[in-house]
């Protein structure tokens, strides 16, 4: 049996994809541009297994078995298997797929994008597929090709009939604009009445505004948005984001029968953001809505505490108390006191309690940190497999050099864990390698010099992780691991 597990992030478009020029190849009628979000707070996790004992392909989504005959799912399987680099016997084995989201599915939060990006990445690992996999992800869900990359990503519509030029490319890495933050306001976490796939098809067939949008609005707007991102011009970024969201939903209303995705609470959020920006005398926040009622706000880190407080004032919780842990999720933030003068100048209606289910505070950083951690695990693996013959201290010195970025990141976040008050996906992925590091000097009979004082935040992180029940339950003594490395020339260290 071969097993691969992968995670993939959600991406939220600031220039929307809506409508296909080819339904079978999933080719869009216009370019789109998005930000890839923090995997600890919004992601899909998929495990794929293949075995000679499996009788048929099967899939489970969020614990429930679903039909494997889904056309888009079959497209992904077909594309990956076509590029597989496995022996004929293994390549013919059936596959079992288990996928889950840590956020509402089919509620207008790009769950299909994360899901198919994750599926394709996991399948590519299982079948040893190399090279760009964004086109394969697109065959499942169009916007999934944007979730393959971190940071700000543009999906080019292309013009070739075969879709070979319809690909996604990163235009800026997450660290390009580290101050950018995202608040996801969950209004409704149930599935929407009209799926995006059906809505797009209906709009292409009936909306005159959609045709105008694709031919006249998006081409210049996506170029202006790219420039705003590269220039870190938040004022322009915010204006373009809100205008594109408004036009997208106008297109949905121009569709016949209309596709109504926003609700009264959604419109109240729009009203509040415009009123807040006007009262502040500058662009402080920008809203965007995908095909659903839930809002995504883009804003700068310095404004997050004030915006959280304003949201809590105009959209109070049912208890009318302070924001609780379950209500405000993601990166921890302490709401700031808002002056009475600012509240008087914000011309918006205060909503009845409970209109927002919860808020997720996130950013576009962790997917990049996860990618970079692969360098550390590769160095570690080459060391214990004895493929790297350099002195141990030289190898460890290189590994420690890579950990500087993680020390600095924890310092910036001001939390024990990368996930905030509790370990997130990045914390869990990092821990096994850190836990086993102490085995290296014992296994190779060489001293290991590590200056703990240079990594105060990571040392607190290590102590915090040691206190977690899942770590304690699965703890393995590093002395035992060292003995295994010494005793074998080739170690399957993932099974230890």
Image (cartoon, rainbow, N blue to C red):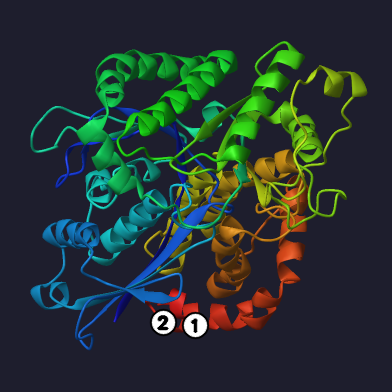
**Is 55 left or right of 416, judged from the image as shown?**
left
Disc 1 crowd rating (10 Å Cα; few below 14, some 14-19, many 20+) is some
Q: Is residue 376 above or below residue 314?
A: below
**Residue 21: x, y in percent?**
17, 34
Q: Residue furthest front?
A: 257
Placement of the N terminus among the 4 image quadrants: bottom left
What element does badge 1 sit on? helix
Label 1 and label 2: CA atoms lie apart by 6 Å
Q: Residue furthest bottom?
A: 53
- Quadrant in the picture for residue 379: bottom left
Q: Residue at x 65, y 82 (%)?
A: 473
**Residue 277: x, y in percent?**
69, 18
Q: Is residue 309 above or below residue 231?
A: below
Specify the label residue 488 is tagged with. 2
**Is 261 left or right of 87, judged from the image as shown?**
right
Q: Nearer the viewer, residue 444 or 153?
A: 153
| Residue 363 visible within the image | no
Count of number-bearing discs: 2
**Residue 331: x, y in percent?**
69, 46
Q: Which residue is mark 1?
A: 484
Q: Residue furthest top?
A: 281
| Residue 107 visible within the image | yes
Q: Are marks 1 and 2 in contact (CB under 8 Å)?
A: yes
Q: Nearer the viewer, residue 152 or 72?
A: 72
Specify the label residue 377 is tagged with. none
Q: Nearer the viewer, residue 22 or 480?
A: 22
Q: Is residue 291 above or below residue 307?
A: below
Q: Residue at x 79, y 53 (%)?
A: 318
What element does badge 2 sit on? loop
Q: Nearer the viewer, residue 463 or 79?
A: 79
**Residue 139: x, y in percent?**
22, 49
**Is 319 left or right of 218, judged from the image as shown?**
right
């Amino acid at each position: 049996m071969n097993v691969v597990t992968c995670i993939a992030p959600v991406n939220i478009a600031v220039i929307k994809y809506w409508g296909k020029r080819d339904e079978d190849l999933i080719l869009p009628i216009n370019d789109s541009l998005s930000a890839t979000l923090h995997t600890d707070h919004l992601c899909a996790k998929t495990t794929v297994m293949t075995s000679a004992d499996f009788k048929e392909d099967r899939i489970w989504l969020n614990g429930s078995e679903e039909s494997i005959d889904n056309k888009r799912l079959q497209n992904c399987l077909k594309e990956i298997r076509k590029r597989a680099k496995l022996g004929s016997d293994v390549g013919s084995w059936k596959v079992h797929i288990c996928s889950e989201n840590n956020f509402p599915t089919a509620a207008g939060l790009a769950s299909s994008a994360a899901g198919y990006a994750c599926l394709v990445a996991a399948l590519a690992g299982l079948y040893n597929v190399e090279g760009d996999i964004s086109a394969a992800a697109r065959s499942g869900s169009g916007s999934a090709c944007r979730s393959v990359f971190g940071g700000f990503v543009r999906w080019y519509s292309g013009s070739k009939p075969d879709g070979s030029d319809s690909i996604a490319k990163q235009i800026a890495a997450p660290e390009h604009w580290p101050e950018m933050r995202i608040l996801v306001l969950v209004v409704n976490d149930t599935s929407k009445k009209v799926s995006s796939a059906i809505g797009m098809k209906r709009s292409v067939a009936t909306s005159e505004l959609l045709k105008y949008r694709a031919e006249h609005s998006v081409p210049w707007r996506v170029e202006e948005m790219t420039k705003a991102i590269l220039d870190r011009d938040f004022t322009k970024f915010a204006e373009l984001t809100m205008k594109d969201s408004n036009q997208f939903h106008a297109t949905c209303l121009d569709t016949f029968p209309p596709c109504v995705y926003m609700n009264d609470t959604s419109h109240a959020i729009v009203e509040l953001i415009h009123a807040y920006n006007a009262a502040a005398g500058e662009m402080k926040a920008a809203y965007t809505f995908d095909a659903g009622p839930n809002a995504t706000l883009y804003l700068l880190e310095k404004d997050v505490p004030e915006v959280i407080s304003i949201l809590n004032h105009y959209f109070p919780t049912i208890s009318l108390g302070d924001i609780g842990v379950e209500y405000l999720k993601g990166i921890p933030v302490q709401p700031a006191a808002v002056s009475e003068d600012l509240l008087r100048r914000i011309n918006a209606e205060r909503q009845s309690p409970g209109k927002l289910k919860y808020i997720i505070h996130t950013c576009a950083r962790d997917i990049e940190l996860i990618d970079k951690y692969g360098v550390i695990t590769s160095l570690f693996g080459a060391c214990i497999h004895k493929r790297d013959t350099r002195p141990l201290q030289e190898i460890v010195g290189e590994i420690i050099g890579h950990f500087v970025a993680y020390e600095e990141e924890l310092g910036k976040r001001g939390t024990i864990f990368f996930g905030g008050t509790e370990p997130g996906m990045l914390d869990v992925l990092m821990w096994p390698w850190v836990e086993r590091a102490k085995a290296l000097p014992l296994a190779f009979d060489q001293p290991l010099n590590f200056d703990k004082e240079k990594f105060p935040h990571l040392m607190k992180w290590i102590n915090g992780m040691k206190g977690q029940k899942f770590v304690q339950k699965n703890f393995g003594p590093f002395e035992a691991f060292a003995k295994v490395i010494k005793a074998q020339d080739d170690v399957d260290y993932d099974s230890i």
